[in-house]
Image (cartoon, helix red, strand yellow):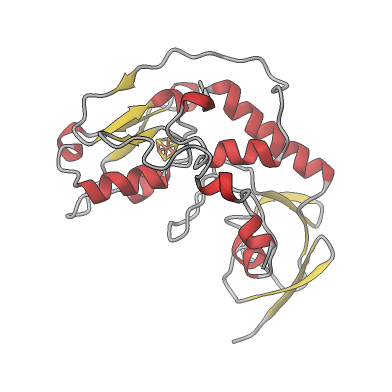
Amino acid sequence: MTEIKFTIDGKACTARPGQTIVEAAKANGVYIPVLCRYEGLKPAGSCRICTVRVGGRPVAACTQPVAEGMVVENATPELEDMRRAVVEMLFVEGNHLCPSCEKSGNCELQALAYRFRMLAPRFPFQWPLRATDGSLPKIIMEHNRCIQCLRCVRSIRTEDGKGIFAAQERAGRMRIGVDPELAARLDDETARKAMDICPVGAILRKEVGFAVPIGRRKFDRAPIGSEIESK
Ligand code: SF4
């Protein structure tokens, strides 16, 4: 198989044909932050946190395949500030009250905020009014925390392949809808998978809470991206 040679921030890297920049970066020990991507799911390129510059142009690293001789800029001050701004926008657009969230310590948005040393967001808080849906048997939908990454829409299905989650409306009014009949058929394992695949605390398992104490969770033990950067 032909090996592709390219660079990220001057570091010589190699990739397999068809690998995206995010995948190849990971294989070369370079972390590119991304929220909408999940291993095994078709990339959506929707959150834009993984934006890098290729030949000076901004591209989504989770969807852009690597090409021979590509020169990728990743951890520049400009791109890092753009990523911090996106994280800040996500924080002000919803209601993210980390100290009271079941996902604290396992939340990728919170972990990125720590990575980018976010203190007070530069944008005004929107404080949207969104209802929490506790009517479903296995899960709670906490729409206040949804960042519309669509991971749940792309991944969680019934045994016969029907999507349980769907994007409803568009732009500022977009929200994640749940089919109540299909959600009623969710087994414990799939409900747990839905909670795990959600990068924030928007999908929570009912009747299971704080099984692992805050302080001993994934990103309490190691910062996000460190498992790639320490390779
Ligand atoms: S509910 Fe979670 S996984 Fe689904 S779109 Fe919202 S943030 Fe993403």
Question: Where is the N terminus found, in terms of image quarters?
Answer: bottom right
Query: Closest to the observer: 19 or 32?
Result: 32
- x and y percentages locating residue 137 in the rendered image: 18, 33
Residue at 50% across, 35% down: 104
Question: Where is the C terminus found, in terms of image quarters?
Answer: bottom right
Q: Quadrant of ligand 1?
A: top left
Classify residue 163 as left or right of residue 32.
Answer: left
Judge whether 7 appears above or below 17 on screen: above
Residue 45 visible, this orientation: no
- x and y percentages locating residue 30 in the rendered image: 70, 61
Residue at 17% across, 54% down: 160
Quadrant housing residue 11:
bottom right
Query: Closest to the observer: 129 or 16?
Result: 129
Judge whether 231 appears above or below 162 on screen: below
Residue at 58% across, 69% down: 19
- x and y percentages locating residue 169 in the rendered image: 39, 26
Residue at 27% across, 44% down: 191
- x and y percentages locating residue 152 in the rendered image: 37, 43
